[in-house]
Image (cartoon, rainbow, N blue to C red):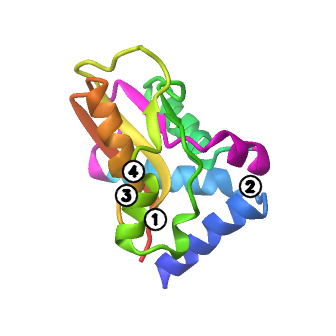
Amino acid sequence: MANEFSLGLIHRYKYHRNEWLEVVLAEFLWNQLQWLGMQSGWDAVVPVPLFSSKQREREFNQAERMGRFLSRRMGAPLAGHVLKRVAPTLSQTMLSRSERRRNVHQAFAPATSEGLTGKRVMLVDDVFTTGATSNACARVLRRMGASEVWVCTVVRGL
């Protein structure tokens, strides 16, 4: 029940521009990080990027906005400039596990030559379902030199 409720909040935030939910969702993430004892020691907060046309259509990137909130709370820089989505992808919502993996395979690339050598990175997204998007992003971040990549999401999808 709680998961369906959380997914509904994210849907309202992303697709119906209920921007007041941003603080609620970001505070939830922050509280979870505190509860897990993971609120400090990070070198960068990296939001999962949207493809440029999707960003224009939606007018904001929910992962970036929540990442900015966490960045301030954690005292770690927001590194929204290091990763980019280089391919438009289908919405993952109706795809199977294998289709999701294929959909995001090679969809992300470094956006800068700036390395992340030895850095602990917190990757931020709204929903984690199969991990296909997170894994694709983490692979790129690790190739850029990140020593650790942890994923922080509002909800675990089913």
Q: Nearer the viewer, residue 140 or 68?
A: 140
Residue 40 in view: no
Circle 3 residue: 132
Q: Residue at x 69, y 60 (%)?
A: 13
Residue 137 drawn above or below residue 133: above
The image quadrant of residue 137 is top left
Residue shown at 58% from the left, 64% from the top? 91
Discs 1/4, front:
4
Per the model, the C-alpha gap separating discs 2 and 1 is 18 Å
The mark that comes first in sequence, 1 or 4, is 4
Q: How many marks?
A: 4
Magenta-colored span? 36-59
Q: Are marks 3 and 2 in contact (CB under 8 Å)?
A: no
Name the quarter where the C terminus is drawn: bottom left
Q: Nearer the viewer, mark 3 or mark 2?
A: 3
> In the drawing, does residue 114 fall left or right of residue 62?
left
- Amino acid type, residue under disc 2 in the picture: Trp
Element at badge 3?
Answer: helix
> Residue lying furthest top in this view?
114
